[in-house]
Structure formats: C-alpha cells, structure tokens
Amino acid sequence: MLFDFNVQTTIDKNYDFCIVGTGPAGITLARELSTSGKTILLLEAGGLNYSDESQDFYKCESVGHDGWPQYTRLRYFGGTSNHWSGRCRPFDSSDFDTQKINGLPGWPIQYSAVQPYLEEAMNILDLDIEQGFKPINKDLLKDHFSPDAFSKSPPTRFKGKYLSEIDAAKNIDCYYNATATDLTLDESHLTVTNIEISNYKNYKSTISANKFILCLGGIETPRFMLNCNNQIKAGIGNSNDMVGRCFMEHLNVPMGSFIYRNLDNTARMQFYTDDNFVSVINIGKSNVTLGIIKKVKSYGRTKAIKTFFKNLACKMEIEDKVQFISDFKCPGMGNIGTLIEQSPNLNSRVSLSKETDDFGLSRAKFDWQINDFDKKTIRETGMAMAKEFSSAGLGIVRLADFMLDKTLDIPFGHHNHHMGTTRMSENPKYGVVDKNSKVHELDNLYIAGSSVFSTGGACNPTMPIIQLCLRLAEHLKAKS
Amino acid sequence: MPQPINRRGFITTFLLVTAAPSTLANKSPYGASLTIPPKSMPDKFTPIDDKFVSVNGWILPTKTLTRGAE
Ligand SMILES: Cc1cc2nc3c(=O)[nH]c(=O)nc-3n(C[C@H](O)[C@H](O)[C@H](O)COP(=O)(O)OP(=O)(O)OC[C@H]3O[C@@H](n4cnc5c(N)ncnc54)[C@H](O)[C@@H]3O)c2cc1C
C-alpha cells in the first residue's frame, strides 16, 4: 500500500524489514522480500513526482573533480531510474579477481555469486533474454580489445513499471515524503532498533523493524550513515573510517579523434579491453567508443553557413583552423569516447560538509579524485587503441596532448555511476559491508546499491545492482 | 622504450606531415580535383616505439612514413 507521510502520519507497527529508498535497488528488494509474506516498510524521501524542494536535499559541497551529483541523481519515487539511459552489460568473472589495487583488496565474492541472478535481473530491466548481450564490430580488433557486448533496456522506469504493484502489495507499506534522518542503536551499539523519519514540514516519527536495508545511492548512503552520529561520533558502521571512502566513477575521457581509412565508413565502433592486456600491463578495464559525427547541429541560415564552412574547410583540408566557426568533423572523422574503470582510492571520498540542509543534517562533501593508477589506465588504453586501430587498417587515431605528455592534467567527465563508498570486504579494515552486504559491525543493517561495489569494472552498474539485490533478498529470506 | 628514428624516416615524415592525415585515407570524397594548400611545419614529432610515431598527436606506423601511404 502507498501512503503519503504528509497525510498519514501514524505508523505504529514493528516491521520485519525496513527498506530505505525506492530506486532500482529498494524496489527490487521490496518486491523480492514481499514474496516471503514478511511485513515490509518501504521509505521514500521524495514524493511521487519531481519537486525542487526534494531535489534541494541532494545539493553537495564539491571540492574535488565535480560530477554534478546534485542534478544527476533524482530524489523521488523510482529514484534515478526516472532518467537513466538503460545501457546494460554484466560484470565479467575477471571483475571479481581478488588482487589488490592501491593496497585495497577486490571483491570478496566470485562471479558465481551473482551470475545465477542475471536472467531475473534482465527480466526486471526488460532486456531481451534470447538476444542476450550482442557483440558489435566482431573481428575488427584482435590483440588487446574485443567487441563490446551490451543490451539496452527500454529504459525501464521503476515508478512506471512497479508503482501499482507496490500499491497493491498487502505486506508492503510504502511511505513517500518520508526522509530517513537517523538510526537508533541498542545499548551494545550492535543492533539498529529504530529509524527516524521526517516529512518536509519537519513532522517526525520513529519506527521499529527487525532488519534495515539502506538503498539511498552511492553518495546518499554514506552521507546518511555519517549523519547518524548521535550515539557514535564517527557515524554508524564507521569504526575503521571507511564509510564514504573509495568513491569511484566510470571515467569519460575525451582521448582524441580518429579518421577512418574508408571515408564512407560511418559505423560506430565499441570495444572492450581484453583481460590479458589489462592484467599484463596492470591497469583498469575500459570501454572505448569510436563514433562519427555526421551532422552540423543547427537549423536554417546558421546551418547553411556552418555547412558551407565545413565543406570548404574539409575540401581544403584546413578543418583544424576553421573549427572555431563550428564544431564539426569532416567525412570519415570522429571522436573517441570512453567508459574507464576507476580504481578504489582512499582519497576519493564522500564526507560531511559544514553546510546543512533544512533538516539540519550535514550535506555531502564530495571529493572525487583519480590517481596515478587511473592515469596509467587512461594513457595505456588510448595508446593501445591508437596502434591497434591503425594496424588493423581501420584508419588512424589522433591522441590529445595529455595522452602523450604525462606532465599535463587529464580532463575527464562522469557517467553518473556512483560506486564504492560502502565497499564490500572480507576484512572490516578495508570496507564497510561483508560478503552478504551486512554492515561489518552491526547485526541487522544491510546496504544495497553500487556503493557496495569493491571495484567497478567497465560495465554499467544498474544490472549488477539488481543482481546483488536479488542475492541479498534470497539471503535475508533464508535467514528469517 | 621509444626508439630513435633513422634519417630517411625523419625526412619522409617531414615531407609527409605537410599533407593532412585524411590523405592517408583510401579515397578522397571530393575526387581528383582536390588541391592541397601549402601547410605549416609539424609541431610535434615523437617516436613511440619501433613501430609507431606520433606526428602532432596522430599515431602513425613508422612504415607508413618511410614507404608513404599505401
Ligand atoms: C543520466 C543518467 C543516466 C544513467 N544511465 C545508466 C545506464 O545507461 N546504465 C546503467 O546501468 N546505469 C545508468 N545510470 C545509473 C543508474 O541510474 C543508477 O545505477 C541507479 O539508479 C541506482 O539505483 P539505486 O536504487 O541504487 O539509487 P537511486 O536510483 O539513486 O535511488 C535512491 C533512492 O533513495 C531515495 N532517498 C535518498 N535519500 C533518502 C533518505 N534519506 N530517506 C529516504 N529515501 C531517500 C531517493 O529519493 C531515491 O529514490 C544513469 C544515471 C544517470 C543520472
């Protein structure tokens, strides 16, 4: 059943499970756990639709490289799935290799732990199971790259697809306009007893549950845990100072441009680095896209003028000098885009800002940093691609200056994949949750979402998030 | 380790980079009437290894430079 916490303010039940957040992670867990017949409280901070009032709580203080997390995440029912793009690629078994990077261990589980949930995750995301993950550009590059294999979700909007199911579920009470603001621990500080929620009019309520699962996303989950600091100053689950550390994104580096040998070729090519290449050179994984820019993006007279200059410049082969008039590419030319694995690094982190939101809670201080390992990944991958593209007779690549000159800073963008801030680890020293996504130092607090990723591979995170949620639901059902 | 390039290689590169990289492509979309205007000197020439050099960031096989575009 759905309830608006602005209207329905009395909640006097003890629930079996309390799930916080209604993005892909929270909704998947609620649906799966509801089949056990247990009672579930599902909490959503925002309303059923977008509002500036709710979105304002996502404002951060950004002190490192900015990824605009206040605008890209969405804070209402369905979470960020309300505008995700739907690109899906599963983790590879090699993503779960346990070697240390920057002194930090990788995943404490194997691929076999998530693989059984792939098909169900594909169903949830409306992916074509028969077609699977289709490799494109087969056999073009052979040495260090394979064709990328991915699948596109429509993209599934969790609100549109699952709102009525949640409303109809007898054992799910879903409260929206209900921000989780605090957790209370018992005297031993080992068990969470209650959760405090508040609506935007500052009306508060405290609810008890047997188990709590945080599904707030890769920035909000650590922020919430660090803000739960009434009983433990450093925040909940943070005795090893790991909550919020190791923030990882997929790096979007404008490596350079290319020109096809055959100028009539307009194919978009996508490649994925081979495991052998990555492990021999000791770098992260990458997904590299080579795409032709075909159109002058303008209309009417401007388009005519731009087209005239473009044609003239391409004809005279002086495009470099005329490109200030309009950003264009001549026939056969294109740009290289990337989705590159960032390694876990303690200095890249989410902590608490001195600025506060309207509840008086500290906003997130967002400090995104890459390190030398990541720079090596970027430069080695770009150079390997440039050589192989040429050797395969496809054309030639022009790498940007920063790819060749190590003294230059590397510009990079983001892919809206917020990972690693409550990472999974065997040893509590190196992470926040254990193999079962349970917070190391607490009996009944769990985390779901890409914040538990120990490493991020070079695949999009949402389908693996769903696989891990299905696994967690099975574990919780078996335990209760 | 980047390898030094021989004299012949250097001279060919010097001549070659006066033409834009698209002349390395198979076929010009604009046919034979294309006139190539005089170009400026190369800015950056960096050997990458024994098989590749970078000419203004374009990663070119050394053999293309010594034999010309095929
Ligand atoms: C533009 C864009 C494109 C993307 N494209 C892709 C793609 O192609 N492929 C892919 O795999 N991924 C993509 N992603 C990432 C994808 O959206 C996320 O991986 C996914 O939404 C994460 O799900 P989640 O449930 O963990 O978090 P979210 O979807 O962020 O959900 C978190 C939920 O928690 C709620 N919440 C937050 N704080 C509180 C609180 N204190 N109390 C109660 N509730 C709270 C929020 O309102 C929200 O509903 C994209 C993201 C963006 C922004």
Image (cartoon, grey):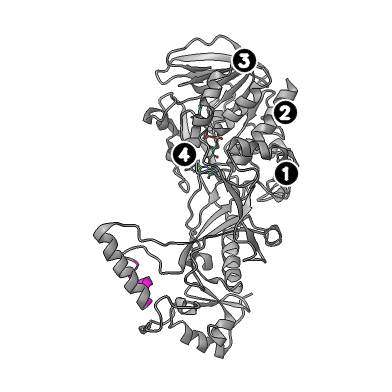
Residue A78 visible somewhere in the drawing: no
User: What is the span of residues highlighted in magenta in the rendered image?
Assistant: A317-323
Residue A284, percent from left and from top: 63, 55
Which residue is at the far bottom? B8
| Circle on res. A83 | 4
Query: Dot 4, crowdedness within 10 Å: few (<14), some or many (≥20)?
Result: some
Q: Are marks 2 and 3 on the same chain?
A: yes
Residue A153 visible somewhere in the drawing: yes
How far apart marks 2 and 4 lie (CA) works out to 30 Å
| Circle on res. A15 | 3
Q: Is residue B12 above or below residue A402?
A: below
In the rendered structure, the answer to whether residue B13 lies left or right of residue B37 reads right
Q: Secondary structure at mark 4?
A: loop
Residue hosting label 1: A111
Asked if the residue under mark 1 is in contact with the one under mark 2, i.e. CB atoms within 8 Å, the reply is: no
Residue hosting label 2: A475
Asked if the residue under mark 4 is in contact with the one under mark 1, i.e. CB atoms within 8 Å, the reply is: no
How far apart marks 4 and 3 lie (CA) works out to 31 Å
Residue, x 59% and y 38% (percent of image)?
Answer: A451
Which residue is at the far front? A130
